[in-house]
Amino acid sequence: MRIVLIHPNYRSGGAEIAGSWPPAWVAYLAGSLKKAGYTDIHFFDAMTDNMSEGELRVRLAELQPDVVGCTAITPSIYVAERVLQIAKEVVPQAFGILGGVHATFMYKQVLSEAPWIDCIVRGEGEEIIVDLMNALEDGRWETDRKRIHGIAYRDQEQIIATQAASTVKDLDGLEPDWTLLNWPNYQYIPLGVRVAIPSMARGCPFTCSFCSQ
Ligand code: B12
Ligand code: SF4
């Protein structure tokens, strides 16, 4: 099963002034997938590489993936939807997945405005993506999707959200695969040094109503 993960080319005009930043979601998902035996994983950092839609088409056509996964925060949602639309045009048989904070909460809106997305992964993706890949590989997507926790999808005109998945309990058991990232590309411009974004914790003990943590 060939999987392509894509960080969309969205630019906020703020963060990019200070540098280019390694996307942690890719490392965490790829680590989990590789541990489960899915080793044919490719990553396009379309944001850091400032990849055009044309380049994206060429790379996807070359690789012919079975699965394309993209991430989105709220500001990058339209670019992410477009990435998966392009994937559907170039490799129609590829299964398109969207994850990240925006799709987690706004899955109804996203699946309504971007019906070409096959599945949304809600919340922490490390365990959900493995359940999803196993179902796809075994040809059980149509029959078993209701039982996969933490996803949303369209069933004809209906939008179905399955039971929420639990959070990852054994954080020490996660083995992010950092090798997919092209490290020299990630630079903190003010200091002229390479940059990493270590993740020391997940979630937050507080409950500010405007915040997703
Ligand atoms: C690191 C970080 C950054 C880095 C990004 C580095 C990068 N290239 O990814 C920098 C400093 C550049 C940055 C910039 C911005 N950020 Co920021 N950032 C964060 C932060 C602190 C951590 C994100 C992270 O890496 N987490 C660790 C990874 C492992 O978790 P994750 O990304 O959520 O991924 C998991 C799941 O969501 C899911 N998943 C995610 N994607 C996918 C895809 C698939 C296919 C699947 C199956 C699953 C999946 O699985 C992953 C593993 O569990 C979050 C706050 C937070 N604590 O989450 C804010 C946050 C994401 N940022 C936010 C914002 C607003 C911004 C900016 C727009 C700010 C600005 N005005 O400039 C810019 C946008 C830059 C851009 N062009 O994208 C908001 C987004 C809010 C929203 N509603 O979308 C957040 C949530 C902070 C907040 N609470 O307000 N940010
Ligand atoms: S804003 Fe979010 S991360 Fe900050 S304290 Fe409130 S709930 Fe926690």
Image (cartoon, grey):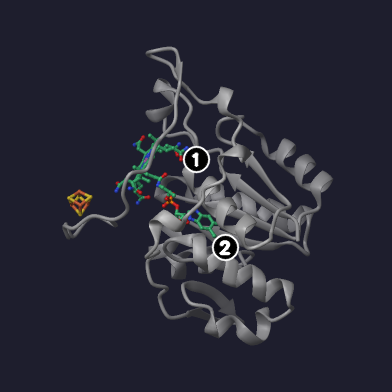
As rendered, which of 184 and 48 lies closer to the eye? 184
- Going from N to C along the chain, the mark reached first, 2 or 1, is 1
- Return the x and y of residue 207 as percentages of the image width and height: 17, 60
Residue occupying image coordinates x 48% and y 51%: 72
* Residue 186 appearing in the image: yes
- Quick one: SS at disc 1? loop
* In this view, 3 is above or below 129: above
* Residue 45 appearing in the image: no
Q: Which residue is mark 1?
A: 23
Q: Which residue is mark 2?
A: 114
Residue occupying image coordinates x 76% and y 55%: 65
| Kind of residue at badge 2 | Ala
- Return the x and y of residue 160 as percentages of the image width and height: 50, 80
Q: Residue 49 occupies which quadrant of the picture?
A: top right
- Return the x and y of residue 137 as percentages of the image width and height: 73, 72
For label 2, being within 8 Å of ligand 1 is answered no
Q: Using a 10 Å C-alpha cutoff, classify the residue at mark 1 as few (fewer than 14 neighbours), some (14 to 19) or many (20 or more).
A: some
* In this view, 168 is above or below 72: below
Q: Ligand 1 is found in which quarter of the picture?
A: top left
- Return the x and y of residue 121 as percentages of the image width and height: 50, 65
Residue occupying image coordinates x 56% and y 38%: 9
* In this view, 47 is above or below 143: above
Quadrant of the snapshot with the C terminus: bottom left
Residue occupying image coordinates x 32% and y 53%: 202
